[in-house]
């Protein structure tokens, strides 16, 4: 049977109609997709920036039907600022994998009791304690790690913050969707590669080929298990939010900072604190500034200040700002001033101390904090010729210096004072001994020269012969020479 031909214009009209329907359907799908995705992306950005309420409400509106009634089994109560379940629904609807993490530091009165309370709060929300590290005195600290469902993340943070005073808090939301997709793709590829290597290994008959295939198979199976472990870790972190809680004692870190500066002149400390050290001419006026700042986490009281070089204490200073007899809260500053006349170069040695104050306003004994700072004071010589006063002062300084040296020398010799009489006795004994020896030498008779030895020539300047001895003396001499015993 012969088929009837269709006119060409009808074919063209039918083709154009089909193309028009396809384009219309695609355009409607694209518009619907854009409308569905644009709102979640906007709300996700708001959630990361901290606008949780808008993020959760928009997410709930997206999941609700057009008529405004919630489906069976869905939540119908409005979500408050502590609700996080809607965020979980939104991320699932978008197909995103997000890791929620928080770091909190809370100051409490009793660290042990606060640790038990924090654990109880997490367990009531269905979470659990993942790790704990506690240290005791002198500064008790407890570091707790909790795991909770993402839907309970915000509520857990709010309830943990009520345990004490929040010092720091950091919340992050890390989108790891790309990493999860990449790991899943690499795992799929690795699994296919392992299966192919297993097939080649079954068909191999050569020993070298078998050994090479087994080595490659072992390496790829190891890489495959590593990637599977990484994927499981990511999925665990996505499925359970992590909260790192640090509990510290309210008075765990008292501290203060002291800064000493100065400027020329006197103005009752109005110019305090100054920029740096003092440099003025000798005899000119200057002002030393003391700036004390509470840099710890506890109020401070009972301040003491002492500078041995300037010879000043807290009661001697001018109060420029604050109350040295009151309580200095964390972050507050106390400014004091001391007016003086610069006479010489000096370097101050200022020490300030204080004690922390508890919640009842009582000072905590044994927790004193202190700081010591030094500053140079330069006395510049004004120049010119010295006058009468300068000479008198120089002479007096020289007298004082000499007197000090004498006193120093006398003090050094005092332990050896017994040596002086001992030396005098030795000198007397030596003098007597020498005199006795000289007397014995003079009293000893002179021996005649031996036979055959002529006496030595007498010196030319020998004095004239002495007069002959008297008869009695001569008789005694002759008798001595004739005495054979002599």
Image (cartoon, rainbow, N blue to C red):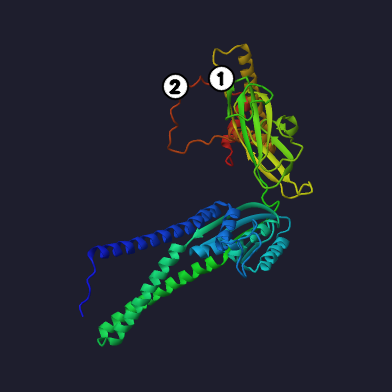
Q: Which residue is mark 1?
A: 381
Label 2 close to label 1 by CB (< 8 Å) = no
Q: Nearer the viewer, residue 381 or 417?
A: 381
Residue 105: image location, x then y, percent: 63, 55
Q: Nearer the viewer, residue 416 or 479?
A: 416
Q: Nearer the viewer, residue 395 or 7?
A: 7
Quadrant in the picture for residue 330:
top right
Residue 473: image location, x then y, percent: 62, 27
User: What count of labels does the image hold?
Assistant: 2
Above-or-below relation of 206 to 76:
below
Q: Which residue is mark 2?
A: 460
Residue 308: image location, x then y, percent: 68, 34
Q: Residue furthest bottom?
A: 205
Q: Nearer the viewer, residue 412 or 16?
A: 16
How dense is the environment of label 1, judged by Cα within 10 Å: few (below 14), some, or many (20 and up)?
Answer: few
Q: Is residue 422 visible?
A: no
Q: Secondary structure at mark 2?
A: loop
Q: Is residue 293 visible?
A: yes
Side of 354 relative to 273 (left or right): right
Side of 30 relative to 312 (left or right): left
């Amino acid at each position: 049977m012969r088929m009837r031909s269709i006119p060409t214009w009808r074919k063209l009209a039918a083709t154009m109609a089909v193309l028009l329907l396809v384009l219309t359907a695609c355009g409607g799908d694209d518009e619907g997709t854009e409308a569905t995705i644009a709102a979640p992306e906007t709300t996700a950005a708001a959630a990361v920036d901290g606008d949780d309420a808008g993020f959760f409400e928009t997410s709930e509106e997206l999941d609700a039907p057009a008529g405004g009634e919630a489906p069976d089994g869905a939540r119908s109560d409005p979500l408050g600022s502590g609700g996080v379940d809607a965020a979980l629904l939104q991320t699932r609807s978008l197909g995103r994998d997000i890791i929620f993490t928080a770091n909190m530091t809370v100051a409490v009165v009793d660290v042990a009791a606060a640790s038990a309370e924090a654990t109880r709060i997490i367990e009531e929300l269905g979470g659990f304690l993942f790790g704990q590290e506690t240290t005791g005195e002198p500064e008790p600290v407890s570091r707790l790690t909790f795991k909770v469902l993402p839907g309970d993340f915000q509520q857990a943070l709010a309830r943990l913050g009520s345990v004490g005073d929040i010092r720091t808090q950091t919340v992050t939301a890390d989108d790891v969707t790309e990493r999860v997709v990449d790991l899943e793709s690499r795992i799929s590829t690795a699994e296919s590669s392992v299966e192919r290597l297993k097939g080649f290994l079954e068909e191999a008959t050569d020993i070298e080929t078998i050994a090479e295939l087994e080595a490659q198979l072992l390496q790829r199976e190891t890489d495959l298990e590593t990637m599977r472990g990484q994927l499981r870790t990511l999925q665990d972190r996505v499925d359970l939010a992590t909260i790192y809680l640090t509990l510290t004692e309210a008075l765990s870190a008292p501290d203060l900072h002291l800064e000493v500066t100065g400027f020329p002149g006197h103005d009752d400390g109005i110019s305090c604190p100054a920029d740096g050290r003092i440099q003025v001419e000798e005899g000119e006026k200057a002002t030393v500034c003391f700036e004390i700042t509470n840099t710890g986490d506890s109020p401070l009281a009972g301040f003491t200040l002492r500078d041995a070089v300037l010879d000043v204490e807290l009661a001697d200073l001018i109060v420029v700002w604050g109350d040295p007899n009151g309580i200095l809260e964390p972050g507050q500053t106390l400014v004091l001033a001391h007016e003086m006349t610069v006479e010489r170069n000096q370097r101050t040695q200022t020490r300030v101390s204080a004690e922390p104050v508890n919640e009842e306003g009582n000072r905590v004994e044994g927790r004193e904090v202190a700081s010591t700072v030094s500053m140079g004071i330069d006395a510049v010589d004004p120049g010119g010729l010295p006058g009468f006063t300068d000479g008198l002062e120089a002479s007096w300084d020289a007298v004082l210096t000499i007197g000090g040296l004498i006193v120093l020398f006398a003090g050094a010799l005092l332990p050896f004072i017994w040596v002086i009489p001992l030396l005098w006795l030795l000198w007397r004994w030596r003098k007597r001994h020498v005199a006795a020896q000289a007397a014995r030498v003079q009293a000893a008779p002179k021996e005649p020269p031996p036979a055959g030895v002529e006496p030595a020539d007498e010196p030319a300047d020998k004095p004239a012969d002495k007069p002959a001895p008297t008869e009695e003396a001569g008789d005694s001499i002759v008798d001595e020479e004739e005495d054979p015993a002599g």
